[in-house]
Image (cartoon, grey):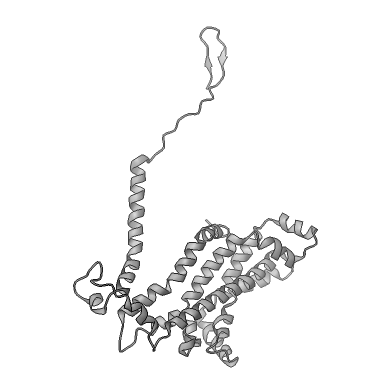
Amino acid sequence: MTTTAPETGRTAPPSNKPRRTRRGGGVMGNTGLYIAVSVAAFLFLIPFYIMVRNALTTDPEITGEHWQIFPTHLQWGNFSELFNDPMVPFGRSLLNSAIVAVLHTSGVLLICSLAGYALARIPYKHANKVFYAVLGTLMVPTAVTFVPSFVLVSSLGWVDSYRGLIIPGLFSGFTCFLFRQYFLGFPKELEEAARVDGLGYWGAYWRVVVPNSLNFFAAIATITFISGWNSFLWPLVIGQSPDSWTVQVALSNYMTNQTVVFHTIFMATAISILPLLFVFLFLQRWLVQGIAQTGIKG
């Protein structure tokens, strides 16, 4: 806006001072936000409190009429009772779950990332048909392929083995789709520079694409690890002997038609979620950044 000087009649230059704008919210708005977040965090932590509280108490206190915020006496012996149970080898099941989850995650990252990179970058006249076929697998219910998969694994002699627990789940159509969407948005200039240096598709993938995509790989690894750790139905069918049980199968054996040992169930549950908690806390920053790069944001 211009103004005219009264003495000379000249037009004064426009003012460069920034205008002040009033921001909404203020102290009251921030206080309300903090209260809402605190209430949500409190409600979120209640199940974890109940789990830890019941893990360190006795069954009569868990099922009693009068609820106590804290146990009368902390039962640290429940921890040793859990691992010394001769009927359920809980320590072995933790090791089995760790091996299955780590190998499953590594295999999915390798196979699905290679498939997604090939569909996104390698020119091939049938690439779209292959991609649509991969998407078609997402429309097939898991219950339809469950029995044929078990028959195939059984005929190969992979029942009660890590091969039977890991290999059938090494490819995921949805994970392949996510990798393809991500690689479609990956800067082509970096790959072109790699080809100028004499690298082929494999060299560009391994030496350029992967090092610059660690955030996305970490996000997919976190989701895949949690899925592999929490898997129940397939390990229940394949791991028929106690030495092949995963932690989820072991947890189910604490609830039978005859008895339900509450404090053991809660202690086993509390211990079984610790690996997931550590993985999530360690990779949460990369998880958020990677999900934003999947191509399905918004």
Image: 163 above or below 130 = below
> What residue is rendered at 80% in x and 58% in y?
196
**Residue at the (35%, 76%) spot, across then down:** 267
- Residue that sits furthest to the left in the current view: 66
Report which quarter residue 256 is drawn in: bottom left
Q: Is residue 19 left or right of residue 26?
A: right
Q: Position of residue 297 (x, y in %)?
A: 54, 57
Number of dots carrying numbers: 0
> Is residue 7 shown to the viewer in this render?
yes
Residue 241 percent location from the top left of the image? 47, 90
Q: Nearer the viewer, residue 238 or 74?
A: 74
Question: Of 132 and 153, which appears nearest the observer?
Answer: 153
**Which residue occupies 62% across, 73% down?**
134
The quarter holding residue 131 reads bottom right
Residue 71 pos. (x, y %): 25, 71
Q: Is residue 292 above or below residue 26?
A: below
Which is more toward the observer, 278 or 259? 278
Residue sitting at 64 percent across and 68 percent down? 113
Residue 232 appears anywhere in the view? no
Picture coordinates of residue 158 (x, y %)? Answer: 57, 89
